[in-house]
Amino acid sequence: MAAVPVARGDATFQAAAARVAAVAFLVLVAALVLGRPSLVPVAVALAGGIYALELAIDDAPLDVAAPVVAAGLLLAAELAYWSLDERERAAGDPGQGLRRAAFVALLGVASLLVAGVLLALVDDVRARGLALDLVGAVAAATVLVTVLVTARREPPQG
Amino acid sequence: MTRTGGPRLIGYSALAALGLVGALALRRPELAILAAPFALLVVVGTREARDPEVELELAIADERTLEGSDLDLLVTIRARRPVDRLELLLELPRHVEVVTGDTVRSVGLRAGEERELEYTLRCTRWGVHELGRTRIRARDRFRIVGWEARGAETKKVKAYPSPLTLRRLVPPVETQAFAGSEVARVKGEGVEYADIRDFVPGDRVRSINWRASARRQSLVVNERHPERNADVVLFVDSFVDVRSGGRSVLEDAVRAAGALATHYLARRDRVGLVGFGGVLRWLQPGMGSTQRYRLVETMIETGVEPTYTWRDVNVIPARVLPPASLVLALSPLVDPRFVAALEDLRGRRFDVAVVEVDPIPHVEPGRTDVERSAYRLWLLEREVLRYRLERLGVGIATWGDRDLETVLEEVRTFRRSTRLARA
């Protein structure tokens, strides 16, 4: 995923981005080897950060590669978490691994579709001049409220 | 079940928030598009999460087993709602190992589906073991939210000591009044020949020894020794346990006590038990298979409870130590309180014999000169202790690498020689 923005940047950007990408890779490897799930979002954020930096430097109009990058980052995170889940070796049902792989692939496809729809929507919104800031603020607030509500533990039933 | 947030919940929420904040800060909607799948996954995953209401049921094949024997355990899992991945961890107590089946299993369940997981377990040591402690963790396919619970149902299994074959036992000096398998020293109706005496009116005709009568020219009759039963009290030392390499003297002592109890009861002797240690346990002498189960179930609860209280035989009820009973002690002879109790019993003219469960193989001689000197001194002290007990007339033999049969033979030999010496 880091290769997409790195390939599009200039030589200076490529040198810096390659270093950040290497760090992101090492953080991901550390997460998998040491069994630290908290390092996975750090690695994904670093890879996403390279893309964000490239966008900020380039300052081009809407980037059509965004859905691909989004789907790729989600797949990377899902595969990393799946690998960490499997650290606790548990004898499972036959075909469990294949079913999980199919679901993760489905998530990747769904995220690609959702991001593609959003990209089209944003393009349309920009064309009509609606306040993108408002939309972004509402979305951020929704996510934070959802986290606060769902992260609260429920008492055991019965 | 307790609802918990998985690592994905925090991670994806953080990434979504970071993407949205980045989009606002850099005014790039592409970053919001990057964040959207993560945010959507969190929202969908938390909304879709429902308590699967998993129920567990345990069934064991038998509540009683022998140590070293296999035991079947069946765990039935039922879920009211679908579970994509349910992980079951079977926590086994010490001295129980799994023979077949994995202690960590993961299954997928549809709504209302029931699955049975079979395990074969083995109790490696006698005792009461609590089986069935479980931990379960259920997750749906999004893995955003999980559900955890501990299984409440457990089953107790009693593992009896493995049986040892013994052909001969330590015979008591005195017998009791009831019929049994021990040849008594008194004379009466029996099979074993004792003596001859002159005929007196009332003697049975078939008791007449015609050859002796012909030699004496007067009637003489045979006297015989009757077979009587005996009272045996197994005296197990639970003050201290010496262990190494997965073996311990207390475990061996209880195994020997179980074997001795079984064989004495088979001879119609009355067998009692005293677990003499931090916790005093006793069982009055009795006969039959009921007494066997009582003895074994009392023995398997034997454990070491550390205490500094001085105990002597006065704390043992008199009915547990009948007069003229054989007190057969099983002890490593490490704690002075137990040794003092043996000497006290001998002083009260009880018939005492000791099987010394050897603690020496479990003790390291030490690395430094001081430790090695202390070890040699300890060995010498044990020699003195054995001599002291033998001087009191207590037959004592050490059970280490030899089989119990050989050790009991050594005790029998000593007791025969002391009987001859007394005579």
Image (tube, grey):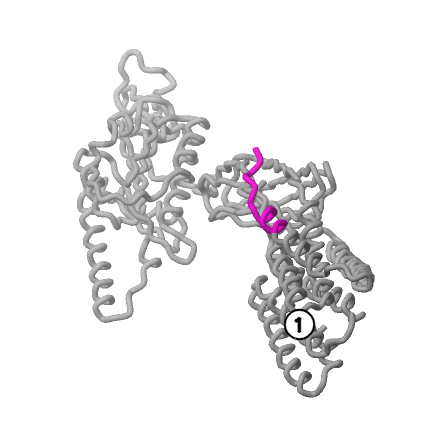
Q: Is there any visible trace of residue A109 in the rendered image?
A: no
The structure residue drawn at horizontal position 40% and vertical position 40%, both measured from the top left corner, is: B168
Q: Which element type, helix, strand or loop, lies under badge 1?
A: helix
Horizontal and vertical percent for residue A88? 60, 57
As for residue B383 lying within the magenta part, the answer is no
Query: Mark 1 highlights which residue?
Result: A47
Q: Is residue B355 left or right of residue B133?
A: left
B43 vs B154: above or below:
below
Q: Residue at x 55, y 67 (%)?
A: A34
Q: Residue furthest front?
A: A129
Q: In front: B129, or B91? A: B91
**Is A11 on the left or on the right of A149, as rendered?**
right
Magenta part of the protein: which range?
A145-158
Please name the residue shown 41% across and 58% down the image. Answer: B245
- Hey, which quadrant is residue B113 in on the image? top right
Q: Position of residue A13 (x, y in %)?
A: 67, 83
The quadrant of the image that shows the C terminus of chain B is top left
Residue B246 pos. (x, y %): 43, 55
- Residue at 20% across / 32% down in the picture? B314
Q: Which residue is nearer to you in this view: A149 or B263?
A: A149
In the displayed structure, does residue B62 sit left or right of residue B246? right
Q: Which three-letter amino acid code belongs to the residue tagged 1?
A: Ala
Foreground residue, A83 or A112? A112
Against B131, is B194 above or below?
A: above
Residue A129 image point, x, y percent:
78, 62
Q: Is residue A97 visible?
A: yes
